[in-house]
Image (cartoon, rainbow, N blue to C red):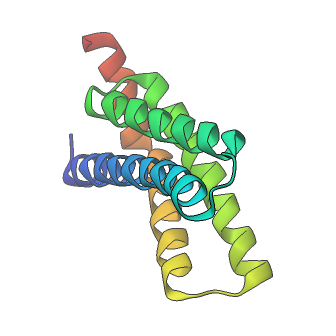
C-alpha cells in the first residue's frame, strides 16, 4: 500500500467521524432549539434524517478502517450526496469560506475513492478480511 492510499484512508476516516459528529450535533440542536427555546413540536423528519446520516457516516468509517468493499460505495454515495448539496448551496447562495472548504474536502475524498490503488486495496481487503 502506497503513502497516498494510506494517508487518504486516514483522512477519509477522520472526515467520516467528523461528519458523524457534526450530524449528531445537528440532531441535538434540533431537539434543544425546538423544545427548550421555541417550545414547538419536534421536526421528526429532520431529526431522523440527521440521525441516519450520522449512523451511516459511522458505519462508513468502520468499513473504511477495515477496508470493506461496501464502505467504498457507501462513502461515495454519502460524499457525493453531501458534495452535490454543498455545490448547490455555493451556486445558489454564494460561496463563503466554510462552503469552499467543504466542497474541496468532499471533492478530494471522492477523487481519492476513485484512485486505482484505492480500488485495488478495497478488492484486496475483501479477500483478506
Residue 43's place in the image compared with 119, above or below, is below
Residue 87: x %, y % from top left: 68, 70
Report the front residue among 54 and 92. 54
* In the rendered image, the vertical position of residue 92 relative to residue 60, given as above or below: below
Q: Position of residue 114 (x, y in %)?
A: 50, 46
Q: Residue at horizontal 55%, vertical 77%?
A: 99
Q: Is residue 18 left or right of residue 102?
A: left
Residue at the image position 51 percent from the left and 57 percent from the top: 36
Residue sitting at the far front: 39
Q: Quadrant of the C terminus?
A: top left
Q: Indicate the position of residue 128 as horizontal and vertical percent values.
A: 25, 13
Q: Is residue 13 toward the left or the right of residue 60 in the image?
A: left
Question: Could you tell me which quadrant the N terminus lies in?
Answer: top left
Q: Position of residue 78 (x, y in %)?
A: 57, 44
Q: At 55% across and 64% down in the image, what residue appears?
A: 37
Q: Residue at x 37, y 23 (%)?
A: 68
Looking at the picture, tell me which residue is in the foreground, 112 or 17. Answer: 17
Give whichever of 51, 43 is nearer the camera. Answer: 43
Amino acid at each position: 500500500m502506497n503513502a497516498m492510499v494510506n494517508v487518504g484512508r486516514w483522512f477519509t476516516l477522520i472526515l467520516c467521524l467528523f461528519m458523524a459528529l457534526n450530524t449528531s450535533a445537528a440532531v441535538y440542536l434540533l431537539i434543544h432549539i425546538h423544545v427548550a427555546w421555541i417550545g414547538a413540536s419536534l421536526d421528526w423528519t429532520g431529526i431522523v434524517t440527521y440521525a441516519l446520516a450520522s449512523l451511516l457516516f459511522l458505519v462508513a468509517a468502520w468499513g473504511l478502517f477495515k477496508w470493506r468493499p461496501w464502505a467504498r460505495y457507501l462513502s461515495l454515495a454519502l460524499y457525493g450526496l453531501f458534495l452535490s448539496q454543498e455545490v448547490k448551496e455555493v451556486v445558489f447562495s454564494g460561496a463563503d469560506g466554510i462552503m469552499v472548504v467543504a466542497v474541496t474536502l468532499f471533492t478530494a475524498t471522492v477523487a481519492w475513492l476513485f484512485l486505482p490503488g484505492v480500488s485495488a486495496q478495497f478488492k484486496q481487503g475483501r479477500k483478506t478480511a
